[in-house]
Structure formats: structure tokens, C-alpha cells
């Protein structure tokens, strides 16, 4: 783990409240989905969602993502960088620039 400011602040916050007992990987994954649905709800009827509400819901999603990564001993920054490397190979710039097709539908 990178042990950054967010991770340390979350660790202390959870420890002070003795919430780790509720933070199984499955519970955290469920919480990510629940909070993501609340984020999506911000855009349910309009593309012009309230920025503060979006920020709050996005913070909830990111919080649970950080907690899950910590629980699994994963570094959030590193797993994003690793995934970008894999995705970059699937979507080379010369074949994917400006296109939204799935990687197996890109022109050769």
C-alpha cells in the first residue's frame, strides 16, 4: 500500500469507530455498487447534476474503493496504472483515437 494521506485518514477514521469488523471485501464491494447507484441517481433526470451532490456521492464511491483496496492489500494508484497498461495494449492509440468501439471491434 502507498500509505498516502487518504489511506491513513481512512484507517484512523475506521479504527476510531471500530468499523473494520463490518468491512469484509464482499461488504465493501456491495457498498461501492450502492454508492455508485446513488452517484448515478444524480444524473437520473438531467445531465446537469448538482456539483456538490455529485462530489459527495463520488467521495463515497472512492472511499469504499480505497477501503476495499486496503483490505485486499492493494495500492489504488498502482492497480490503476497496471490496468491502464493492459488497456493501452487493447486500445492502441492509432486504432482507437476518437472511437468508442470495443477493442475487438476496432479496425485493423
Image (tube, rainbow, N blue to C red):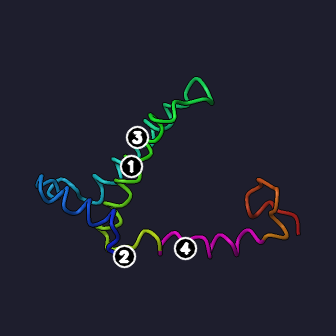
Give the residues drawn in magenta, as a range: 78-92
Disc 4 to disc 1, how far (Cα)? 20 Å
**Mark 1 Cα-neighbour bin, 10 Å: few <14, some 14–19, many ≥20:** many
Quarter assignment of residue 13 = bottom left
Residue at numbered disc 2: 2
Disc 4 to disc 2, how far (Cα)? 13 Å
Mark earlier in primary sequence (4, 3): 3
Label 3 sits on a secondary structure element that is helix
Q: Is residue 54 left or right of residue 66?
A: right
- Tell me the quarter of the image containing the C terminus: bottom right
Label 4 sits on a secondary structure element that is helix
Quarter assignment of residue 15 = bottom left
Disc 1 to disc 2, how far (Cα)? 21 Å
Residue at numbered disc 4: 81
Q: Is residue 97 left or right of residue 41?
A: right
Q: Position of residue 84 (x, y in %)?
A: 60, 70
Number of the front mark, 1 or 3:
3
Residue at numbered disc 1: 32
Q: How many marks?
A: 4
Mark earlier in primary sequence (4, 2): 2
Residue at numbered disc 3: 56
Amino acid at each position: 500500500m502507498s500509505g498516502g494521506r487518504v489511506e491513513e485518514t481512512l484507517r484512523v477514521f475506521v479504527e476510531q469507530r471500530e468499523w473494520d469488523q463490518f468491512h469484509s471485501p464482499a461488504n465493501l464491494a456491495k457498498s461501492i455498487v450502492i454508492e455508485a447507484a446513488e452517484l448515478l441517481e444524480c444524473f437520473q433526470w438531467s445531465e446537469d447534476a448538482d456539483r456538490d451532490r455529485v462530489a459527495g456521492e463520488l467521495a463515497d464511491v472512492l472511499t469504499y474503493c480505497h477501503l476495499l483496496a486496503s483490505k485486499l492489500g492493494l495500492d489504488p494508484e498502482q492497480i490503476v496504472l497496471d490496468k491502464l497498461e493492459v488497456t493501452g495494449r487493447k486500445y492502441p492509440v492509432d486504432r482507437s483515437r476518437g472511437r468508442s468501439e470495443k477493442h475487438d471491434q476496432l479496425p485493423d
